[in-house]
Amino acid sequence: MRILVVEDDPDLARQLEAALGDAGYVVDLAADGEEGHFLGDTEPYDAVILDLGLPVIDGLTVLERWRRAGRSMPVLLLTARGRWSEKVTGFDAGADDYVTKPFQMEEVLARLRALIRRAAGHASSELSCGPLTLDTSRGRVALDGAPVKLTAQEFRLLSYLMHHQDQVVSRTELTEHLYSQDFDRDSNTIEVFVGRLRKKIGGDFIETVRGLGYRLAAAEKDAEGAGAKEGAQDAS
């Protein structure tokens, strides 16, 4: 998952970048509202952490411009302001959640996970695809209850596919959501990690849709479908 952090305090921005990186996210940083608006308007993000008190363009204006332009990514506001009226203004401008400084980093991460889950239509922190489960809060993957050890890149790839299971996801989309803006998008990295992931979770979960990309679907569904098809052939 790829996150944009728009924060003018360099120390706090580095802390957020480090915490998000440790939690498995890819992070782009912007130090003012102008840069933040440009990145959020031109790059695909799974969520944005946006400070309201930004130089050049304030955070509220940035958010309003995104929403008017149809940018629908979840936005978590950060602010030192504590008055309820300013929180209401932020929500009315299109914010999805709100954290007041100072805050605990664990709270920011928990709220961010919840926003990403809800945006993808998931209510629980544990995502399931047949016997395959991924715990977004603990960063754990299991197959038939047995833990599966993944690298950070493999986990990011599986997490994105799990959030968008039963949907066809293109290689370009995966690259844009799993790597920062300066990543070499002409490489075959996605194909390499898909291959490694298939070896660890089994080859039936990730389907290659020729010319379009990949789709994650429960292997047991495929097996049931194949059995039904064989039964129909036998009956005929």
Image: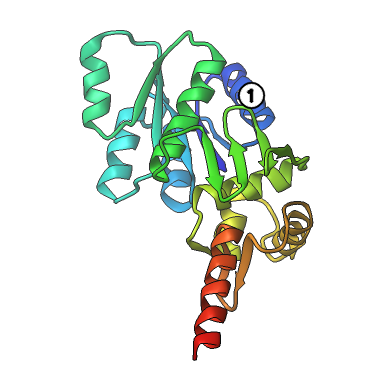
Q: Which residue extends farthest front?
A: 235
On screen, residue 181 above or below 96: below
Tell me which amino acid carries mark 1: Ala
Is the N terminus in the top left, top right, bottom left or bottom right quadrant?
A: top right
- Position in image of residue 22 (x %, y %): 69, 28
Left or right: residue 56 versus residue 197 is left
* Residue at 45% across, 25% down: 111
- Position in image of residue 82 (x %, y %): 32, 8
The image quadrant of residue 37 is top left
On screen, residue 16 above or below 209: above
Residue 32 visible: no
- Give the residue pinned by disc 1: 19
* Residue at 63% across, 59% down: 205
Residue 28 visible: yes
* Residue at 63% across, 62% down: 206
On screen, residue 17 above or below 27: above
Which of 92/121 is in front? 121
Which of 122/169 is in front? 122
* Colour option used: rainbow
Which of 15/30 is in front? 15
